[in-house]
């Protein structure tokens, strides 16, 4: 199979609180920035993938006549899965130049629909979860963690350390929403949201967007930026109801998508220089490190506590500050991908020296779905 | 516990037997006639072997507290804090529920403690399965 490369990547001009833009304009602002990054215009795009808005709405708004579209919408990892589908589409000749967009007025809620899980009262989640008082992701995504803490002896302090380390990364990033260094005590003193989760262990809610442009590897040298090659991908889904996870201490979707991505990339754990794990809440990096085999079961919290993922550590993780400190619009996966691309281009605010392979693991819903993308700046 | 009404489930043809059961004080599960797999939530086929040959049966109503959070965020139907729990039934399946008859604190809510189902009538059509510590611990 021929290779596929990311040749355009950009976020919205502004991130954080952006009351001047509607949701579809956040998609478009990111798309226009990515097109400029790649030296293209909308007329050059023949494939469109997006989530949160329909590909129809995005293509029409941007003035694109696509010959391939993908509206896969499985939550915040949809964009990882779009990358995977775009690679296959380009390799099969279904289209040549794919634009993937994300935009979300998560905080300002301008031109945005309601962000509610589960759908109506007759869905399975509506019948078997909503009646018990769930109030959005902070009361659902968090539900498995007490089980993990009892089974593996993880402490409240260890969970808090995830947020501390990511704030350390964010302190190096001028675009991060929160940049002041914090301590474990600060995290444990912050307001309780849903025991055992404190405010600083929960993601931000902000506005923003991002976009990627993918072409075949043969064309990659024709573009102005250093190409970032997609060398492995995986995707899976598990359950729309967190109460129905097979194992409350491990995500099946992480395991399936992550292992498939690493196998298809032909890499081992030691080959990964840089890693992004979608962190809507502080336990997600712990689950991701274990489910992808970077740590043994029950050992990821100690791995983070000991400093392995912090600046200067052997496995730099969530180097933009993550959903906990950088930004989180609702479907954060696009921002994780953008940080992987920046690291492999060598232009990240907290650059990992010599990073050549980045692994980016996304989650959708409440452990409901996963997409994983392995990227390299070394051509095939 | 509740202020306004909770969000109420709207049964579908595939789940009606479950909600009929809770009104009668029964927690109903399904078992595959071919592979014996017991599962939840309801559906008219086995998620383990795809057989359509499944039977409804009355479960023991016993289980254990598998995990939970104690929500502090406002909800129109509850006074926070209140626990949202995952219960593992003795027959194997898990379900979300609330734990009643005990304090909503980490000290009172010990993981793996035994639970028994109780039913709360929340409308003319719906009774919800809730769980209480066995022995009525408080």
Image (spheres, coloured by chain):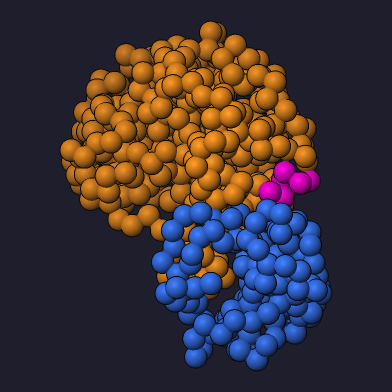
Chain colours: A orange, B blue
Identified at 59% across, 81% down, the residue is B120
Identified at 68% across, 53% down, the residue is B106
**Residue A324 is a magenta residue:** no
Give the quadrant of the C terminus of chain B: bottom right
Q: Nearer the viewer, residue B62 or B32?
A: B62
Picture coordinates of residue A237, whole percent (x, y): 58, 51
Depicted B58 relative to depicted A108: above or below: below
Q: Farthest residue in the front direction?
A: B138
Q: Farthest residue in the top direction?
A: A353
Identified at 67% across, 42% down, the residue is A255
Q: Nearer the viewer, residue B78 or A216?
A: B78
Depicted A318 relative to depicted A104: above or below: above
Q: Is residue A361 visible?
A: no
Picture coordinates of residue B128, whole percent (x, y): 59, 79
Left or right? Give the position of A85 relative to A293: left
Q: Is residue A107 visible?
A: yes
Residue B104, image quadrant: bottom right
Picture coordinates of residue A345, whole percent (x, y): 43, 14
**Residue A147 is a magenta residue:** yes
In the image, the segment drawn in magenta is A146-151
Q: Nearer the viewer, residue B104 or A305?
A: B104
């Amino acid at each position: 199979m021929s290779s596929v490369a990311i040749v355009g990547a950009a976020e919205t001009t502004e991130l954080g609180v952006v009351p001047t833009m509607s949701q579809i304009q956040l998609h478009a602002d990111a798309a226009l920035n990515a097109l400029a990054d790649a030296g293209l215009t909308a007329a050059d795009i023949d494939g469109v993938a997006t989530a949160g808005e329909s590909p129809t709405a995005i293509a029409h708004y941007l003035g694109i006549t696509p010959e391939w579209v993908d509206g896969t919408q499985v939550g915040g990892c949809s964009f990882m899965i779009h990358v995977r589908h775009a690679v296959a589409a380009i390799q099969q000749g279904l289209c040549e130049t794919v634009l993937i967009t994300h935009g979300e007025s998560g905080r300002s809620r301008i031109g945005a629909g309601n962000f509610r899980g589960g759908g109506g009262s007759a869905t399975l989640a509506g019948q078997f979860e909503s009646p018990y008082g769930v109030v959005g992701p902070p009361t659902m995504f968090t539900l498995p963690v007490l089980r993990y803490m009892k089974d593996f002896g993880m402490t409240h302090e260890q969970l808090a350390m995830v947020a501390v380390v990511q704030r350390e990364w964010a302190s190096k990033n001028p675009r991060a929403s929160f940049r002041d260094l914090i301590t474990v005590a600060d995290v444990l003193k912050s307001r309780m949201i849903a025991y055992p989760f404190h405010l600083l262990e929960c993601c931000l809610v902000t506005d923003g967007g991002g976009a990627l442009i993918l072409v075949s590897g043969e064309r990659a040298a024709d573009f102005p930026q250093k190409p970032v090659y997609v060398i492995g991908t995986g995707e899976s889904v598990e359950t729309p109801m967190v109460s129905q996870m097979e194992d409350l201490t491990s995500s099946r979707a992480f395991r399936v998508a992550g292992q498939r991505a690493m196998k298809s990339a032909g890499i081992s754990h030691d080959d990964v220089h840089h890693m992004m794990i979608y962190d809507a809440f502080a336990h997600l990096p712990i689950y991701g490190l274990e489910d992808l085999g970077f740590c043994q079961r029950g050992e990821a919290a100690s791995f983070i506590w000991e400093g392995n993922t912090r600046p200067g550590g052997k496995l730099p993780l969530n180097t933009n500050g993550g959903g906990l400190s950088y930004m989180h619009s609702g479907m954060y996966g696009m921002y994780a991908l953008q940080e992987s691309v920046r690291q492999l281009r060598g232009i990240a605010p907290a650059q990992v020296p010599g990073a050549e392979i980045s692994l980016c693991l996304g989650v959708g819903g409440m452990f409901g779905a996963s997409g994983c993308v392995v990227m390299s700046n070394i051509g095939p | 516990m509740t202020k306004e009404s909770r969000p109420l489930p709207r049964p579908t043809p595939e789940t009606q037997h479950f909600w009929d059961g809770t009104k009668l004080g029964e927690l109903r599960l399904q078992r595959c006639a071919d592979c014996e797999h017991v599962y939840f939530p309801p559906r008219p086929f086995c998620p383990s072997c795809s057989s359509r040959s499944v039977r409804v049966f009355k479960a023991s109503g016993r289980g254990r507290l598998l995990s939970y959070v104690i929500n502090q965020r406002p909800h129109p139907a509850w006074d926070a804090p209140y626990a949202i729990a995952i219960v593992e039934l003795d027959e194997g399946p898990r379900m979300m529920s609330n734990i009643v008859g005990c304090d909503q604190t980490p000290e009172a809510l010990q993981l793996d403690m035994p639970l028994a189902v109780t039913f709360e009538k929340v409308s003319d059509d719906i009774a919800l399965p809730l769980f209480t510590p066995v022995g009525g611990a408080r």
